Structure formats: C-alpha cells, structure tokens
Image (cartoon, rainbow, N blue to C red):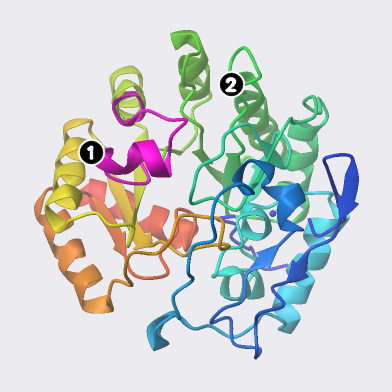
Amino acid sequence: MPRLQIGEARGKAQRVGGRRWRLRLDPEAQTDDLGTMVTVLERAARHPEKQSRPDSPMLRKPPWLRVRAPGSEGYNATRRLVREHGLATVCEEAACPNIGECWSVGHATMMIMGEVCTRACAFCNVATGKPSPLDPTEPDRVGAAVAAMNLSHVVITSVDRDDLADGGAAHFAATVAAIRAAASDTTVEILTPDFLRKPVAAAEMAIDARPDVFNHNLETVPRLYLTIRPGARYYHSLRLLERVKERAPDLFTKSGLMVGLGESKEEVMQVMDDMRSAGVDFITIGQYLQPTRKHAPVDRFVPPEEFAALETIARAKGFLMVSASPFTRSSHHAGEDFARLKAARAVA
C-alpha cells in the first residue's frame, strides 16, 4: 500500500444544541464551482453566538479562487476512511477550500477533543458551544488510524478547550505518544490552541511531547485581534511560539497568517518580524475566505502576485520555509513542506 500523507477531519450527523444536523451545501450556490459554496451546518445551531450580528456581504470570488466541487475517486476513498475510523477533520469542520485537492490524494487534518469550540472567532467555521467531555480512547484511536492508513506525515489540530484545566495539553501529548507507538515512522505536526490563562506547565506538556513540528497560528495582525480573534491575545500567542524554542530549540516551529481582512502590508511585515524574533522557522500566508454572512467580511481578495511578493519578503527576513498563496492553509501540503523544511535547515 503506498504511503499517504495527512496534513491532515466526519460527515456524520453532529449533535449541536441538543439536535442532530447533517452537513449540507450552501443553497445559494448556483453551480458545481465553489465560487459561493461553503460546507456549513444549520447556521443557528452551529454559530448561535453570531445570530444577532447583521449579515455581511459575501464578495464574489475572483477566478484564481474558484475550485471544482469535490467528488473524485480518491476524495471518496479518503472520505470513507475517515468515516470508518470515526475521525473528525478540520477539513470538513472549517470548510477548507482545499478539501477536494487534499482528500483526492489521501491528505486530511485530524481534529481532536471534539467538534465544538469554546471560542467564537469571527473568521472560523468550527461550531461554537459547550463541548462534550474528552474521549479517553481518542489518542489510541488516532494512533491506530494513522497506522492503518500508512501515513508518512500527520497533522493533529484541535478546537479550543478553555473548559479544561490544561486547555487539552495532556490530550495532545497522549495523542502524539499514541501515534509514536502505533506508527513510529510517521512524522507528527501539532497545531495547538494558545493555552491562554492556563498554567505554564500546560504549554510545556505539549512541547515535551516532542512533535516534529509545533504550529500555533497568529492568524491576523495585532490591530484586528479584538474583532477577528477576540478570545485570544496576540502577544500571548507570540510568547507561546517563543517558549517552544526556549524549551526545545531543535523543534521546528510554524505559524500562519490570513490576509484580506483589512490589514496593511506594513502590518503583515511587522508580524513577520515578530515571528522571527520568536524564532519561528516556517510561516504560512493565505487568503481569508468568509464562511457565512455572519462571519467577518472579506475586505479584499489579494492577487497571486502580492502573495509572491510577500513570500520574497518573508524569505529575506530569514524564515527557513515560506508558503504564501491564495489557497495556503496551515496543513496544506504539510508533508512535502516538512521535507523542504528539514532540507533548508540542513544547508542553513
């Protein structure tokens, strides 16, 4: 069986607010092109905290952001696999535009600690509410799934779990350990929450799990945090990334940024400088796409040539690895990028 790469979420009915809802396609979509199509649950159940907000206009996507609806043989095979193993994926939960491409070649990003987040970020499509207790069998099930799928690289992310004393750090550590035990040749990348208002020992527990890549996204520029990422604090997130390098200098660190939310080029460059000051090795920059009319509106669609310019600037600032394009997401091409990251360190 060829080795797959998961960068890498369950289409079963999900229980939100006491009712079960199934994924559906946005009824406003007119064609099988995903120009205005997003995968969402019943909006009132999925994002109850956003229902009092006025609708925001949804800009028509430019040609470079249009993708075909998924449905290839490879996509369906990956879909069956995640169902069989009872996995949740951020690919589905966050309505990622790359799901057709990634799933067609066996890539998917596993999302642990449930499908309901305790935060209500204005950009995110993951359901908000009161999450269920942690499933103690989940780490072993993830490890078994990684082994069964013969993965060469896996990305593990999660919802925010502010309800837990350690923010879910022990669950991350247990999941990494389970993958190491079940699939020792698989490299592991974790994309963690910020562990805000948790003991320092919580972040240290996740670091000490020794993933191959420790990723935590800054998401946007400091000026926009209050409206875009109100439950987080920019400098706390930056400090988490710095702490990883202080405690485990050899670990690769990674962070991502969305553009198209109203930030300036100068603000993006300042975030790059802040990341480099914290020792971040790998930066990802992608276009923000508005999940629903209740989410933050797109300020503008950044053209591909501007992404190319941002990549040039980031490389000049000393990042070992840069991925910048309209479709760039944290786990997009994660396995291939990890190989390039190791190669870049070897010659640095």
Q: Is residue 187 left or right of residue 29?
A: left
Q: Residue at x 39, y 64 (%)?
A: 298
Vertical side of 165 occupied by 263: above or below? below
Vertical side of 302 occupied by 168: above or below? above
The magenta stretch is 218-237
What kind of element bears circle 1? helix
Q: Camera-side residue: 287 or 109?
A: 287
- The spot of residue 134 in percent (x, y) is 77, 26
Q: CA distance from mark 2 to mark 1?
A: 23 Å
Checking the image for residue 275, the label placed there is 1
What kind of element bears circle 2? loop
Q: Residue at x 72, y 38 (%)?
A: 182
Q: Residue at x 37, y 32 (%)?
A: 251
Checking the image for residue 53, the label placed there is none
Q: Is residue 42 left or right of residue 317?
A: right
Q: What is the tally of numbered marks visible in this picture?
A: 2
> Residue type at mark 2?
Gly
